Image: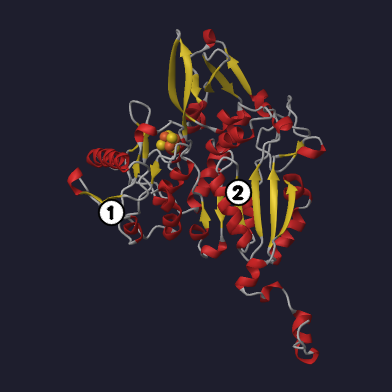
Amino acid sequence: MLNEAYKPSEHDSFFTYFNWGQFTDEEWLLCPPVVALGGDGAMYDIGFQNLSRMMASGKPIKVIVVDTQVYSNTGGQACTSGFMGQISDMAQYGKVWQGKPEIRKEIGLIAMAHRSTFVLQGTLANTSQMIEGFIDGLMTRRPALFNLYTTCQPEHGVGDDLGTHQAKLAVESRAYPIFTYNPDKGIKVEEAFDLSGNPDMEKIWPTYQLKYTENGREKSMELPMTFADFALTEARFRKHFRKVPRDAWNDNMVPLAEFLEMDASEREDKFPFIWAVDRKQALSRVLVAKRIVESCEERRDFWIMLRAMSGYKPEEAKPEDIEGKIRAEVVGKIAQGLMKLAGGNGGGIVNLAMGAPTAATTAAAPAAAQSNGEYMAPWLETENCTACDECTKLNPKIFAYNKDKKAYIMNPDGGPYSDLVKAAEKCTAQVIHPGLPKDRTEKDIDKWVKRGEKFN
Ligand code: SF4
């Protein structure tokens, strides 16, 4: 079979000690991955020492953790992955105990401490971050841990069809920040650690619009999405909340996000609450118990810690760039008009030169111009936007709604080029075109240009 090429005297010793580490990169990519799958009970708690030993070994074994924050298949006992205040077997609610008293164990950080393990923490809320993390983690010649937020409907107390919805809320409320840690990207934490994909990076709590009805009229208000706003939607936390009848509202009640900013003396005689709506869409105030306040503080602090690890630095407030805003809108409209003339999405037909203040500097260019490193301004077919919120949530500094609730590019420089590509990927109406980046020094820029190509 080996055409007599195998000579025991020459080859025996090599094949006696041969292992995966001697594969070439090409041979490595042909190997099917070895994947282990377990719940958080198995990986965070009962089997943790084995998981740790495996990660320390450096062997390229891939582990998926289905993180439901509770022992789902043995009756719902408390797990170290659970949130503070979460009510379950062995973390009951009563006079002495009010749900789980300890903070959540962050297995992603523990995996990072092994220093050679690829880590993905992801959810269905952001499928592109999750799939990209799977690909990178499966391809790397290292151990990989994929820690995935997973709803357990009976233990969390949510509807069977709400898995994706709750995962989104978990990310938006900082209950479950998503991230990757890829040691192949550098030895500094900020090189290897990537927090992108979380909404409103610059804020402690992202915001959302609460719609309600008052005197027969529909209204809405913008509110911070705290951990408590997420917890209110699940039965596992419900005992920590109490709805207040309207006639009992008083001045000592303080919105939770404000309460969290107060020191101990300011908090005296104050009662934190969050806004909610009842079945008739009427506005109500819901009091938040101490344990959930503590849980909010813990999730807030964890978010601040992750942000610092990612090297994130809040931008200094800049004066509003009115001219830039108008220019971006004008450029968007011109591009849209040209695309209509071209009779389709244009397939790279428009090249908008950097700094183009008027239509006079807008030039049509062949698709080949896209790959020559030129800047091409992003554009958005505003009229065809279906207001799905994906882009405005992803980066409200780049995308905003106009008065007709149609998205437009408010500031093309409001975030990294990767956000434009991600928004294009998420846009349900496929109306976002990321153009080409102005700054080619951004992290992984070639990869993002490649991903953005098909949307231009
Ligand atoms: S993602 Fe697309 S459809 Fe959704 S709001 Fe943005 S532009 Fe409109």
Which of the 4 quarters of the picture holds residue 8? bottom right
Residue assigned mark 1 = 365
- Residue in the picture at 56% in, 10% down: 245
Which is nearer the eye, 208 or 404? 404
- Residue in the picture at 56% in, 45% down: 127
**Is the image coloured rainbow, by chain, by secondary structure, or in one colour?**
secondary structure
Q: Amino acid at mark 1?
A: Ala
Which residue ends up furthest to the front in the rendered image? 343
Q: Residues within 10 Å of mark 2 (few under 14, many from 20)?
A: many
Residue assigned mark 2 = 121
**Location of residue 442 in the rendering, given as x and y in whole percent from the top left corner:** 39, 57
N-term mark: 2 or 1: 2
Q: For mark 2, give the secondary structure.
A: strand
Which residue ends up furthest to the left in the rendered image? 360
Relative to 133, residue 203 above or below: above
Which is nearer the eye, 117 or 165? 165
Q: Quadrant of ligand 1?
A: top left
Q: For mark 1, give the secondary structure.
A: loop
Please identify, in this view, whether the residue under mark 2 or under mark 1 is nearer the observer. 1
Asked if marks 2 and 1 touch (Cβ < 8 Å), the reply is: no
Q: Amino acid at mark 2?
A: Gln
Any part of residue 44 in sight: yes
- Residue in the picture at 37% in, 60% down: 441
Give the Cα distance between marks 2 and 1: 41 Å
Any part of residue 87 in sight: no
Which is nearer the eye, 7 or 294? 7
Mark 2 close to ligand 1, CB under 8 Å: no
**Which quadrant of the rendered structure holds the N terminus?**
bottom right
